[in-house]
Amino acid sequence: MDESSRQHMEDCFLRSPSDIRTTNVPAVPKSQAADNKSRKTELHVLRLNDESRQMTMDTLRQIHGPEFQLDDISKYKDRARGGHGVKHSYWQDRGTLVVQSVQGVSSTRGNDSDGDRLRRYALAKLENYGFQAVHCLEAYEHCSGDTEAALLLLYRRYMRIPDEEQLTLEPPSEQEILDMRADEKEALESIYDKAYEEREANRVWNLKFRIDHLLAHSPSEVRKAREAVLAAAAAAAQAALDKKKKPPLRCRNFDRDGTCKYGPKCRFAHLPQQPTESDTTKKGSRYPYEAPFIYLKTTCHDIPHELRLRYARHLYKEAREICRDGIPCVYSICDLLQSNEQLAGRLDTSAFPSPKRSLFYDEPEGGGVNSDAEHHQAPKPSHYARGQTSRNDGGHQRNVEAQTRENRRLLQQFVERRKEERYQKIIDGRKQLPAFAEIERILALIESSPVVVISGETGCGKSTQVPQFILDNWFFRALQLPAKDNLPHVEIICTQPRRLSAIVSGGASGCRASGSHWSAGGLPDPTGKQGVAKHATQFLHHGHLVAATGLGSATRRRYPRDRGRRTRAIRGARFPTAKSSKKSCLRRAQGSESLFSCLPRSMAALFSDYFSGAPVLDIPGRTFPVQQLFLEDILEMSDFVMEYDTKYCRKLKKQEQEILERELEYADVQASGEAPGKKVKDEKLTLAETYQRYTEYSKPTCKSIYLMEPMTINPELIESVLKYIVEGSHDWPREGTILIFLPGFGEIQSVHDSLLDNALFSPRAGKFILVPLHSALSGEDQALVFKKAPPGKRKIVLSTNIAETSVTIDDCVFVVDCGLMKEKCFDSNRNMESLDLVWVSRANAKQRKGRAGRVMPGVCIHLYTSYRYQYHILAQPVPEIQRVPLEQIVLRIKTLQTFASRNTLSVLLETLEAPTEDSVLGALTRLRDVGALDAEDQLTPLGHHLAALPVDVRIGKLMLYGAIFQCLDSVLTIAACLSNKSPFVSPLNKRTEANKCKRMFALGNSDHLTVLNAYRKWLDVARRGNYAASRNYASEHFLSLNTLETIADLKYQYLELLVSIGFVPINVPRRRKNACDNILTLTGVEQNHNGDNNRLLTSLLCAALYPNIVKIMTPDRVYIQTAGGAVPREPSHHDLRFKTRGDGYVKIHPSSVNSQVSVFQAPFLVFQEKVRTSAIYIRDCSMLPLIAMVLFAGSDFKVELHDGDFLFLLESGWIILKAHDLETAEMVQCLRAEMIKLLEEKIRDPCLNLLHHKNGCRMIANIVHLISKNS
């Protein structure tokens, strides 16, 4: 029994079939059965409803012409005949009931009155002629139930025929007209025989034909074409026999008297006499001097109604031309209808009355068939004018007068503040910093050299003081100028590796004055056009500076050099980042503004050499002495001993524990041999070798070192160290903050919970304040680290490496360094990011040690051994440019004329600590896949647009598609969240409540829609209330107010970028500071027509993030017995598995709203990123509609026939969907091809107005309809 037959047996008997070859089938243990579950993906069937089919065919015929037809099955070859097929990895035909239509039966037809039945019959008759159902009902009611009058009304309104028509010739008498019709009738009878029928004498003539070129538009007829060949042959043979039979002669006696004496034996036919029909000629009918009304009915109801109406309209026009001369036209019309050559390409494609409007609505354009010349609506503009922003080139020029006034105001403010006592105290404090003694040398070097490298120890003032020296120098020079002279203009931009560091540095510098000319933190402004005239100094982080400068080009266009001077200070605290390397590369390639870099001493030489021997100024440090201890030292001092039964011990079997106990007795004797090599890591040593390496320490210390799991954070050890710091016998200070460096948020939470349960360190004891510091925390929580503890209390700060640089905790005395950190890496071959747990470098450790000696002598305790520090960890961290994706950097380099003649690989290999060649080539490959680069690695139109958007290329593509599909505001919100961070926060002591609140916002099995929903609800409160209301709402629902406001800022900046490249045709005014998000109002209804269509939004995510697709694997169906019979049991979320093509099985991150979902309506998820921690997790995922997969996913789309089923194949068959029938597969394939052409045309020409495009508006509406109406 094959797998398919077995599945059908299970569906039939609701249980697995037994093996008839044996009676002793061994029972499978439940645990083993659970582990060995067979999991596959459901093979879903894509169906299109009748309305969608009709709309799609109408769209394709509008594009290709009315003769367009789908390909037939002869084009396909069944690829699975005699083979295994591609469907073996999918569940098939699992008995899932598909509801295709619903019909109420509560009221039976038997209760209908005769009037109701007559009404239904009349409406069905009217609709058979192709008229819209709503118009048929309107006409029927208007004519008070007169079907004939309603039909005439519909024909006149659809064909635009006036009630009275002027005839060219004066018609003869009524009898002559009847004679002409009688002659034409005899001719038609002789020509068409039985195909002609007079339904009503002198009123309705009915002719039946088989029109092959019309039947070609009927999918059902195309399917029956082969079978019809045999039927036609048989019918032809029968017709030949019928012609041989002569019609019987009528009996004259029967005709005269109604009886015949021969009765049944008479050899003549006794046929009843036909009754004489009265003359029912329609009053006023003057055919053939006026055109007849021509209706087309068909027995093939899948021929498009609009197509039949177009044929009828064309035939009526031809009839009018013939009848102008009083010539009968029926034969000519019938001949024309049967001739495809005469009709091809001649049909009028102007629209019929819209079903959305009344039948009596008069269209603004003319063009009825009665007019001698076609009147067309004035052509609408094919392009819209490019929008303007307040930051466009030429749109916002520097106001010299306003700038002069601002400079005078700042100078006057400086003069007044110099007289204040508070200012003098600040100056006295600044003089204590080592950098103050080097002020003259610093200013002289900056004036004389375009690039200056300033190095110094932590706390010397290089980050906070040097920008102030430049600004003070400008003030003093300005005071020496005559009052009438214009003041020189200067701008200072300072960057930090982190946003928090930028805020701290800006705060430290800004305390010198009121802060009006300091901009700290630097909200991410991709266009680089903050209110610089109001800020003499800006503190940004590296990413914001790169976005702000646009690699130099945009800024120089807006700020010509002869109007002032710009100085940039790069604060590379630990090592060059990808963005600082890019800035340095550009600065070396072209001479731009002054640049000075403030670095630790270990990096000064590297930067100096890169800039061809730039001068280096070294500032001595001002740190107090710090006692440095390692793991072996603190273990010896404290009472901590590692035991076997803790989860932080290395894994030992019981037998190994017994051997270890015996070794402890004589390990010191064995340690007398040769010492292990310095390159051997501690975890590779035996117990005896551990004694050899640490001979100066006790047995318990050596035992603990041997048993410790090196890459694990041990909260028990940290508690012991803290207890020794607080209560131990030593001469260390008994005051000051204790700073603990931990790898990530999970470890912070673990240690935090451990300390909460400790009687000494718990806040309930009233002696200590626990303060977590992590980038995922809200700004309010992060700010707690800078507040001084109340008298009698001490702070314990649990921080990641965010506290290593430029975050000065004034009263920090003790540092506990766990030696581990989370580092984001990117695997170019697998296209996956990983958050790896790695050892810190010696540079990191030295930086952490420096945190303890800022205000008094301190102590730094490293929870790793001195041997690891000296011999086993790196001297410097791996540069960021060597471990991040490089797509955005490559795009920026491609847009610069400076590197136009150079190879991208050679440019990047010249950067500071250049990336590997494989990383660069991988980035080029991914950009080709997304369509940003062509085969020659040149920018495509899409690539130029993506390069202008300072976001990940996939997020940029999402923004462009959002503008095209009229859901701009919603897509900008999602893009801002993806490029920034989630607004959801999770306090350590309220994680359960935070998760519950987040799931309240859950929408459509989508993290992206969940964030969008939360932002919309907060924005609604902010609009209706005030700032306090929005802040309270954010706090109550565990949302970060700062992040929400940043999302609003990013949305506005992204809108400006889309306007500047022509994708959004609006004028964007300058945004007021702290203004509410008004993009929905600003962009208007047209740009947001589909903004609430959640299925469309997730479909656009598929287009942007593909191939980041996950398959949902479900187990075999299990049935449970109920009172109503056996029913399938729904799987739990633990039974599901998730699989990607490149990495196999993955997990959904616990923070996702989909992590606890057990039933998904569709088997595919799209995600933004994969991250490897303890396992491979996907973040921010959304369930995809099936139609989105076949319309938007990838370029390797195929339709193939397998075992009689038409399948959509993506990713070389890794993703499979089944089409309901051939017509569905062909429609989707053709529509997808036309959509791709339309999108390419729009991207090549951003100002193209798709709403006025000949095919654009209909194509977009069709795609949105398919996504919305077909689940």
Image: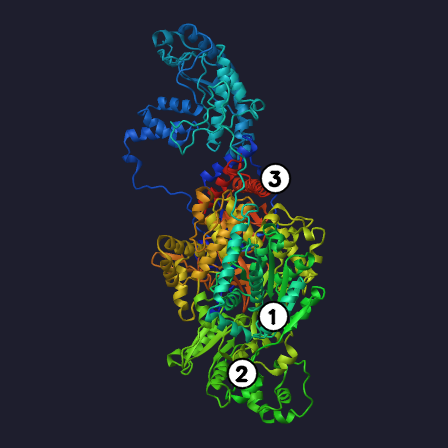
Residues packed near mark 1 inside 10 Å, few (<14), some (14 to 19) or many (20 plus):
some
Distance of label 2 from label 1 (alpha carbons): 27 Å
- Residue 857, disc: 2
Q: Can you give x and y, in whole percent of width and height, for residue 1022 in the image?
A: 38, 55
Residues packed near mark 3 inside 10 Å, few (<14), some (14 to 19) or many (20 plus):
few
**Left or right of 580 on screen, residue 178:** left
Which quarter of the picture shows residue 918?
A: bottom right
Q: Earlier in the sequence, mark 2 or mark 1?
A: 1
Q: Can you give x and y, in whole percent of width and height, for residue 890 in the image?
A: 64, 55
Position of residue 717 relative to residue 877, above or below, is below
State which mark lies toward you, 2 or 3: 2
Quarter the N terminus occupies: bottom right
Residue situated in front as seen by the camera: 1078 or 1270: 1078
- Residue 439, disc: 1
Label 2 element class: loop
Residue 1088 visible in the displayed image: no
Task: Give the amino acid at mark 3.
Answer: Lys
Residue 1067 visible in the displayed image: yes
Q: Can you give x and y, in whole percent of width and height, for residue 561 in the image?
A: 62, 53
**Total number of numbered discs in the rendering:** 3
Mark 3 in CB contact with mark 1 (< 8 angstroms): no
Label 1 element class: helix
Residue picked out by circle 3: 75
